[in-house]
């Protein structure tokens, strides 16, 4: 008797919990990312074709920059490091873990170590020496991913968007003086209950848990004139832990959620309520922070820098790397491709992967996953072909289309590289990869029309066959 043909699995809905975390700009790892990108910006400001791979390490009252840099720029590493430390808000260090006055690092007294060499001539010869801009090879091999989802107006997963923005709001109310007793270090985490629809799209239904651990001054004892350098107003004393937590819930959590827009046009605050579990400084006091509490390294927050665990990650960090390093530039173009697919209505979710070989300009592969959410009769192969038609992912082309040789990277180094509002300042295009390309014309095309358009294009000049 002949075997029965396999039955196609019926798509069903399901409910699940998903969590994402983030950290503030004062977290030791994030401090290192910002220093590395400040060095990169200083190089690009004087020499747009600088080759930069800058790593930073910090512990206690010490910051070290190390790496390989070839540039015509004259750099004052000491000034760059201290400037970032001050901008974040680290202005006091006491070498005593029982001290309540130490913020964990001091811009004026910290030790700055420098171990910088030039780029290897072997790498330079294979990647860019003697090559036209469009023929510059990838700075290394690797795989990179970009992700987008239609659950929020900026096409970011709500768990990660919320965790990231909570951290940014913590910093904003600290620097504005509204919650002057906050200190620079801090972490956030968000769990959301999702409904996955039969078509593969996901919809956030309610905010399940919010965790905030933030560094703060000594409750009921710290005074503002001593905590905040340069403060000349009326004296104030830090509130109790209970009062701090209440202010954080009102001025940070609720305010942040009011400013995140869901797919249905409503603020994310509509998903928050008595059902939400709150854990604000669950370990108790968090006075000692920054590098005094934990050592920091560049590139150790790569999931926070991207999609909070959604999609996928190739493993390469971003900060301190010039545009020839495809760990960074290709991840940016992957985001633009994924976001373009979603905002153009070709699918509700999209994951894009690229891969490269060192010294080779054309990507070795392009992979697209839409989780079954593709629309208008198009399939994943059609969407892959559309991206091949519309995008050029050679490193030189990415650097031009996203304006990546401009000194604007320190701004990306905290609060996520994606889901940010693109803008132009002093002629520089910030977060240009968040400007999605309009691909709506492909909604009306059949598969054979997309294939014909691919054959008529010059895709073999920019992609492998």
Image: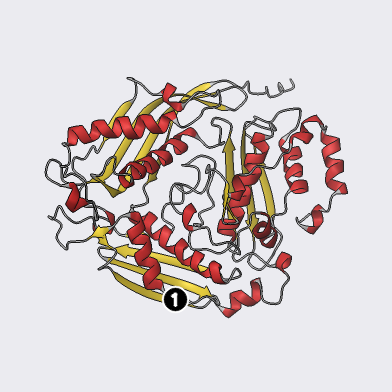
- The chosen color scheme is secondary structure
Answer left or right for 291 relative to 373: left
Q: How many callouts does the rendering have?
A: 1
Q: Quick check: 233 above or below 440?
A: below
Q: Nearer the viewer, residue 320 or 125?
A: 320
Measured as percent of width and height from the top left, residue 127 is found at: 65, 71
Q: Quick check: 13 above or below 395?
A: above
Q: Which residue is mark 1?
A: 116
> Looking at the rendering, in which quadrant would you find the N terminus?
top right
Residue at the image point whose x is 20% and y is 51% from the top: 227
Residue at the image point whose x is 57% and y is 36% from the top: 155
Q: Quick check: 327 above or below 49?
A: above
Q: Quick check: 123 above or below 362?
A: below
Inspect this view and state whether residue 96 appears: yes
Residue at the image point whose x is 33% and y is 60% from the top: 86
Q: Nearer the viewer, residue 397 or 184?
A: 184
Measured as percent of width and height from the top left, residue 90 is found at: 28, 57
Answer left or right for 14 relative to 32: right
């Amino acid at each position: 008797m002949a075997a029965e043909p396999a039955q196609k699995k019926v798509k069903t809905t399901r409910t699940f919990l998903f969590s994402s975390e983030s950290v503030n700009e004062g977290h030791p790892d994030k401090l290192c990312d910002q220093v590395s990108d400040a060095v990169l910006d200083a190089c690009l400001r004087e020499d747009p074709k600088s080759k930069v791979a800058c790593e930073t390490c910090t512990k206690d009252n010490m910051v070290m920059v190390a790496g390989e840099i070839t540039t015509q720029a004259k750099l004052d590493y000491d000034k760059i490091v201290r400037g970032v430390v001050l901008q974040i808000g680290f202005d006091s260090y006491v070498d005593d873990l029982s001290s309540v006055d130490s913020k964990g690092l001091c811009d004026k007294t910290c030790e700055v170590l420098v171990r910088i060499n030039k780029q290897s001539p072997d790498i330079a010869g294979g990647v860019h020496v003697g090559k036209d801009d469009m023929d510059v090879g990838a700075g290394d091999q690797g795989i990179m991913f970009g992700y987008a989802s239609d659950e929020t107006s900026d096409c970011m997963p709500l768990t990660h968007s919320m965790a990231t923005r909570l951290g940014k709001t913590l910093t904003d109310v600290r620097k504005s003086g509204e919650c002057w007793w906050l200190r620079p270090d801090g972490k956030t985490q968000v769990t959301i209950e999702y409904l996955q629809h039969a078509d593969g799209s996901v919809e956030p239904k309610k905010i399940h848990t919010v965790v905030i651990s933030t560094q703060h001054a000594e409750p009921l004892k710290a005074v503002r004139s001593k905590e905040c350098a340069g403060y000349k107003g009326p004296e104030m004393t830090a509130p109790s832990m209970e009062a701090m937590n209440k202010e954080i819930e009102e001025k940070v959590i609720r305010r942040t959620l009011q400013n995140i827009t869901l797919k249905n046009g409503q603020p994310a605050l509509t998903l928050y309520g008595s059902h939400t579990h709150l854990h604000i400084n669950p370990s108790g006091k968090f006075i000692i922070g920054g590098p005094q509490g934990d050592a920091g390294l560049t590139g150790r927050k790569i999931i926070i820098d991207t999609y909070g665990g959604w999609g996928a990650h190739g493993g390469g960090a971003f900060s301190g790397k010039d545009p020839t390093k495809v760990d960074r530039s290709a991840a940016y173009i992957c985001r633009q491709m994924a976001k373009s697919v979603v905002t153009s209505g070709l699918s509700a979710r999209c994951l894009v992967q690229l891969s490269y070989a060192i010294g080779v300009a054309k990507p070795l592969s392009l992979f697209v996953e839409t989780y079954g959410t593709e629309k208008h009769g198009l399939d994943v192969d059609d969407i892959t072909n559309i991206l091949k038609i519309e995008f050029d992912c050679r490193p030189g082309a990415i650097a031009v289309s996203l304006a990546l040789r401009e000194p604007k990277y320190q701004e990306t180094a905290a609060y996520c590289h994606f889901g940010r509002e693109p803008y132009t300042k002093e002629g520089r295009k910030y977060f240009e990869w968040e400007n999605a390309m309009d691909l709506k014309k492909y909604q009306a095309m059949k598969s054979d029309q997309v294939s014909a358009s691919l054959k008529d294009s010059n895709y073999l000049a920019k992609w492998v066959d």
